[in-house]
Image: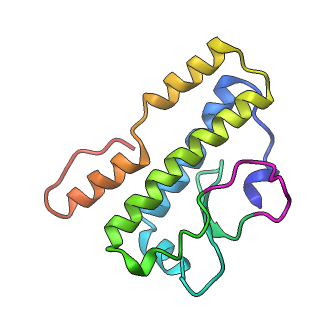
Amino acid sequence: MEGIQNPIARTVEEVFSDFRGRRAGLIKALSTDVQKFYHQCDPEKENLCLYGLPNETWEVNLPVEEVPPELPEPALGINFARDGMVEKDWISLVAVHSDSWLISVAFYFGARFGFGKNERKRLFQMINDLPTLFSKCLCLNYLFVVKCETNF
């Protein structure tokens, strides 16, 4: 997978930059590219995952085959619930799972590179200063009714 081949982050700033890149890719998947994303999540296919990549892109793909995986895996089987839910509710569900995956990846890097209490706290604060994907999806759903101010 493309996201694993990128250079590995080693400082709080680099981990946060990786986080922001992956987050930006997921925002695109769940907003401007939502129809493309929706169609790629065919329930007839195997268990699919939504990956945000550090270069601000996204992909829908099967989970990696190596066990354990190099990075924490996003929610598995996002495609199976697609047709059983209202589209905006399904997008919100994918968003909330993607939020937890992003934090998981960031803190995986933090653990792997030996971040201490202060570095972990700083990373968490930097992440926490950004809106969640879930809150962005709620705002985007609201845009259909009224124009709201967004700050991606």
Residue shown at the point (73%, 53%) measured from the top left: 3
Q: Is residue 127 left or right of residue 65?
A: left
Q: Is residue 31 visible?
A: no
Q: Which residues are magenta?
A: 64-74
Q: Determine if the magenta segment contains residue 66.
A: yes
Q: Is residue 32 above or below residue 149?
A: below
Q: Is residue 63 visible?
A: yes
Colour mapping: rainbow
Q: Quadrant of the N terminus?
A: bottom right
Q: Is residue 138 left or right of residue 58?
A: left
Q: Which residue, as the protein is rendered here, is positioned at the far bottom? A: 44
Q: Which percent across, then down, holds residue 91?
A: 40, 64
Q: Which percent across, then down, holds residue 38?
A: 46, 75
Q: Please identify the quarter of the rendering in which residue 147 is found.
A: bottom left
Q: Please identify the quarter of the rendering in which residue 73 is found.
A: bottom right
Residue shown at the point (78%, 52%) measured from the top left: 4
Q: Please identify the quarter of the rendering in which residue 108 is found.
A: top right
Q: Which residue, as the protein is rendered here, is positioned at the far right? A: 66
Q: Nearer the viewer, residue 74 or 29?
A: 74
